[in-house]
Amino acid sequence: MLIILPLVILVLLFGSLFYYKKSLEPMNLKNMTEVSIDIPRGSNVYGIAGILKENGLIKSKLVFECLTIKENKEGRLKAGSYTLNTGMNLREILEELSTGGKDDNIVTFTIPEGYELRQIADKLSEEGLADANKFLKLSADANNFRGKFSFLKEINQNQSLEGYLFPATYEIFVNSTEEQIIEKMLEKFEEVYENDIKDQLKGRNLNDLIILASIVEREGKLDSERPLIAGVFKNRLDKGMKLESCATIQYALGERKEVLSYDDLKIDSVYNTYIHKGLPPTPISSPGLKSIRAVLEPEKTDYLFFRTKDDGSGGHIFSRTYAEHLNSNPKK
């Protein structure tokens, strides 16, 4: 009896080890079949194991539970929609569930750098995520959100949120309101403000920074040129020259014309920097981080002018004097 008991224990031990290793293997590696599953929100490891077992994706609920705990991923399994297959082993399935699947309650949208409020509203409307008019009405007055975001205290009363809805990719719930979407975008700006702007302002005005960054965003096509363009505008401001930015004229016109006429340059608007010195009263677009950093640290230069190259590169020719500027244009 004393000899049999250790043998039984040894058989059970090896049998359990064999069972564990076999349970880690794919269900069917030779004839793989895709299986779509949904993991509901709030599901724990035991509930997830049951879903996987019912859908023929794992051999053992117990082994899945043990492996999840062993790999310290018990609290990292994410809800969502997944497409798995019977050729995946247990570790591959676990990794997939840890990465996260598609949540049918969540949608994503992307706002490109340089978009204006009206463009953001139109894009959200086209994607069925917001009513453009409601969105524009809410974003037309920063006071609607001033109490929730500290940085908004630094911009003028009755100013819109132009420039402060940060361009990025966002995830929102399907039935998010216009107000919730705006708050999500302001939260992103606040994150950028705290991490990249606040300590670099050094007494400078936040609104002035974002205004100039929005112009740099619209004027610059190449990231490498943004600090240089910011340097040109800084030089013009320091010398009391008009900015003469075509981007501000386009904003005043309400359309982005490829070629501006001389009449366009005479438009009666506070955003016409060909007429008025200094910065326009508000940003003209949502600048990205590279344009913001360019204004925080503009390139030191003696250039005062620039114009777009004719080679389609999006680059610019920079000049120190007006005569050089005129000579740089073959169509003058």
Image (spheres, rainbow, N blue to C red):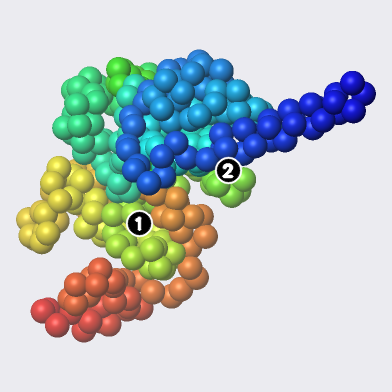
Q: Which of marks 1 and 2 is in front?
A: 2
- Residue 215, percent from left and from top: 32, 53
Residue appearing at x 7%, y 56% in the figure: 263
Q: What amino acid is at disc 1?
A: Val
As drawn, the residue found furthest toward the right would be: 2
Q: Which of 158 and 50 is in front in this view?
A: 50
Q: How many labels does the image show?
A: 2
- Can residue 194 be seen here? The reply is no
Dividing the picture into quadrants, the one containing residue 194 is top right
- Can residue 98 be seen here? The reply is yes
Q: Name the residue under label 1.
A: 216
Q: Is mark 2 on a helix, strand or loop?
A: helix
Residue appearing at x 41%, y 39% in the figure: 28
- Residue 32, percent from left and from top: 35, 42
The image quadrant where one finds the C terminus is bottom left
Residue appearing at x 39%, y 74% in the figure: 303
Q: Badge 1: few (under 14), some or many (20 or more) residues near its Cα, within 10 Å?
A: many
Q: Name the residue under label 2.
A: 195
Distance from label 1 to label 2 (Cα)? 21 Å
Q: Is residue 326 above or below residue 195?
A: below
Badge 1 or badge 2: first in the primary sequence = 2
Q: Nearer the viewer, residue 238 or 130?
A: 130
- Residue 55, percent from left and from top: 39, 24
Q: Nearer the viewer, residue 290 or 253?
A: 290
Q: Nearer the viewer, residue 18 or 89?
A: 18
Q: In this view, does 180 lie above or below 111?
A: above
